[in-house]
Image (cartoon, rainbow, N blue to C red):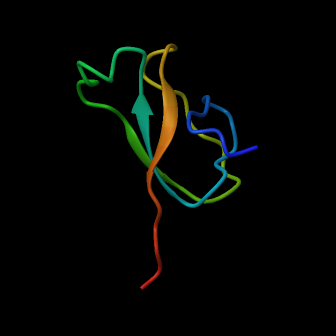
Amino acid sequence: MGERTELRPGDKAPNDGRYMEVGVDDFHMGIEGPQRVVMKKGQKLPDTQNPDRRWQLTRKNHPR
């Protein structure tokens, strides 16, 4: 089985990277002012601005 793409607040981040809030209607309308956080693997994801939203990995941090 693959990795989940949407995570709930309080879940542990499966990978290092930037996570952004995604919501129920964000496919067509987008979320106005979504919260973005940078997390390390194993850190707990913070609460979202709306209980119907989840976290999604947007881009992994690559060391340079």
Is residue 56 toward the left or the right of residue 41 in the image?
Answer: left
Which residue lies at the image location 65% right of the left edge and 58% below the top edge?
A: 41
- Residue 26: percent from the left, percent from the top? 33, 22
- Residue 25: percent from the left, percent from the top? 35, 15
Which residue lies at the image location 32% right of the left edge and 32% below the top edge?
A: 34
Is residue 3 toward the left or the right of residue 6 in the image?
Answer: right
Compare residues 28 and 38 and report the one nearer the observer. Answer: 28
**8 above or below 61?**
above
Q: In which quarter of the image is the C terminus?
A: bottom left
**25 above or below 27?**
above
Which residue lies at the image location 47% right of the left edge and 21% below the top edge?
A: 53
- Residue 20: percent from the left, percent from the top? 41, 40
- Residue 30: percent from the left, percent from the top? 26, 24
Furthest-right residue in this view: 1
Can you tell which quarter of the image residue 45 is in?
Answer: top right
Is residue 16 toward the left or the right of residue 14 in the image?
Answer: left
Q: In which quarter of the image is the N terminus?
A: top right
**33 above or below 29?**
below
Compare residues 30 and 8 and report the one nearer the observer. Answer: 30
Q: How many callouts does the rendering have?
A: 0
Furthest-front residue in this view: 1
